[in-house]
Amino acid sequence: MKRWLAPLAIAAGLATGAGPAVAAATPVPVDVTFTQPCPTFDATLHATGKGGTIVLPGDRLTFTGPNLRVTITGPTGKSVSYVITGATHVQILPDGSQNVTATGRNVILVPQANGHQAGLFLTVGTVSWKLNPDGSENTLFSGKGLVTDVCQLVAP
């Protein structure tokens, strides 16, 4: 399983298909509920609002989430809600690896991989990471942004 970029990326991927390169894309309505593993439980995420994918020349993508909101609920009903209107920028490199930079407010879904457990993270500001061609992590979060472990916030 690969690291997901953010609920907005998932929502945008569900709502829009890949198409020809465009300079801008019109965001589409999003209303999706799914589960994501945390270290010791599964959390439920419900994302609503709008999401879009901008396909740019040079093997670049930007996932947008104007007015995108997500509520994350743990197994005991404890929940947090965020407005996640940030953008996630992806540069696909010639070897198939990806440089990813999230700007603004995003929720990043991280699978269990490379010796760390699965999780959910709120990022605020600029946070970057790199994925290998197979989707596994090359580098974890870096940058001047803040990273909050959402699983800890909704844990029983």
Image (cartoon, helix red, strand yellow):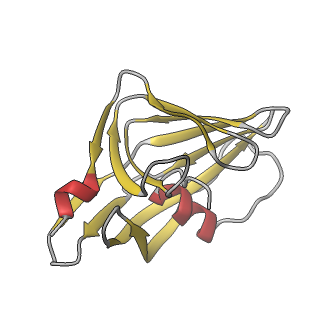
Q: Quadrant of the N terminus?
A: bottom right
Tell me residue 68's x, y (percent): 38, 58
Count of residue discs = 0
Q: Does residue 108 sit above or below 72 in this rendering?
A: above
Q: Quadrant of the C terminus?
A: bottom left
* Residue occupying the point 62% across, 52% down: 53
Tell me residue 67's x, y (percent): 36, 55
* Residue occupying the point 69% across, 37% down: 98
Q: Does residue 47 sit above or below 5 in this rendering?
A: below
Which quadrant of the view contains residue 127? top left
Q: Is residue 10 left or right of residue 77?
A: right
Tell me residue 96's x, y (percent): 80, 40
Instruction: Residue lying at the far top in this picture: please name it.
Output: 144
Mark yes or no: residue 51 visible. Answer: yes
Q: Is residue 140 left or right of residue 120?
A: right
Tell me residue 97's x, y (percent): 74, 38
* Residue occupying the point 56% across, 53% down: 3
Mark yes or no: residue 27 visible. Answer: no
